[in-house]
Image: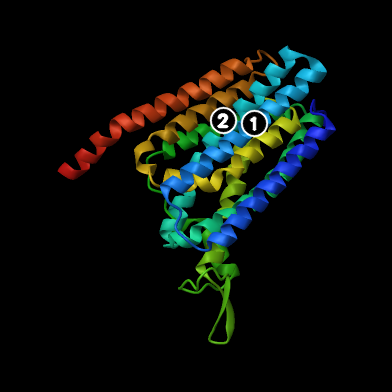
Amino acid sequence: MDTIAPLWLWAVFIAIVIAALFVDFVVLKKQGAHEVGVKEALNWSLVWVALSFAFNGLFWWAIQQDHGTALANTKAMEFLTGYLIEKSLAVDNIFVFLMIFTYFAVPPAFQKRVLMIGIIGAIVLRTIMILVGAWMIQHFHWILYVFGAFLVLTGIKMWWAAGQEPDLESNPALKLLRRIMPVSKNFDGEKFWIVENGKKVATPLLLVIALVGLTDVIFAVDSIPAIFAITMDPFIVLTSNVFAILGLRAMYFLLAAVASKFHLLSYGLSVILVFIGTKMILIDIYKIPVAVSLGVVVGILAVTMLLSVKTAPKIASDRSES
């Protein structure tokens, strides 16, 4: 698996991730269980975005020193495009998390710990999947067409499912988990296991964490092929993915407060998936420039969010009238 990144940059990346997780856990432990407000979520979101851009700047500098400015610009743009795609797809992931927390009535004070554990699991899982995916692409080039077709179909499916209320009760993953583990009806602080009638049973919090983990597996299957359409460099794929995930917890609490205002976002994400899938299918016929891909992704997100904000009051008024 070839990568343009020097070995020392891999070491810097690993050190940043470990330090970031350590700081997050230390802050989490000191604060204890508490509800995260919009201001706190916004501040942390800005920190994670700034850290991601700073790393991209360091990445640009490292490539520029060894290979020149032109290639450094291209690789830095690949990182930025991949980062934006992963951030965008994470939004849909967040809406599913919100549905899970609402369904199980998870107290806001406990949601933070669930997301933190979910982030660590996501980093480990995606690292494995990215390395496997890079190996497959290197040895079986035709897999790109399979990934591309899968993304197109996923985008079409997402478009038809957008706007519909998901039914978590009929979710096969939830049914399977309930068969595997006996679950208590009540929360007991942040405990995962309690004893009821002499038997050890799981709390709803453990069930929520398991569902969040399974949800990320499903979304990783969509998002990882999407970034391979932008770059084949495993370093860029991995780093852009991980930096997008690191800010997931803060972004959840930020978007949870304004989720209803971006009701059209799923349509935009579906169009992005179809575009990325098409780009991957056409890779041996015409390679769409990274700058064009970046422009398309940003443009679709901007238009979708603008239309969401403009139409939200109208929808709200229509409901109130009915």
Along the viewing direction, whichever of 14 and 171 lies nearer the viewer: 14
Left/right placement of residue 240 relative to residue 312 reads right
Q: Is residue 154 left or right of residue 316?
A: right
Q: Examine the rendered structure and indicate whether residue 200 appears above or below residue 76.
A: below
Question: Along the line of sight, which residue is nearer the eye, 105 or 257?
Answer: 257
Position of the N terminus, as image quadrant, is top right
Q: Earlier in the sequence, mark 1 or mark 2?
A: 1
In the rendering, at what x and y percent does residue 78 appear? 66, 24
Mark 1 to mark 2 CA distance (whole Å): 15 Å
Name the residue located 58 percent from the left edge and 39 percent from the top edge.
48
Name the residue rendered at 54%, 48% in the picture. 249
SS category of the residue bearing label 1: helix
Label 2 SS: helix
The three-letter amino acid code for the residue at tag 2 is Leu
Left or right of 35 in this view: 236 = right
Q: Disc number at residue 84?
A: 2
Q: Quadrant of the C terminus?
A: top left
Residue 174, how many percent across, how many down? 52, 60
Q: Residue furthest bottom?
A: 198
Residue 54, numbered circle:
1
Q: Is residue 322 visible?
A: no
Task: Please give left or right for residue 214 compared with residue 76 in the image.
Answer: left
**How many C-alpha atoms fall within 10 Å of the one at disc 2: few (<14), some, or many (≥20)?**
many
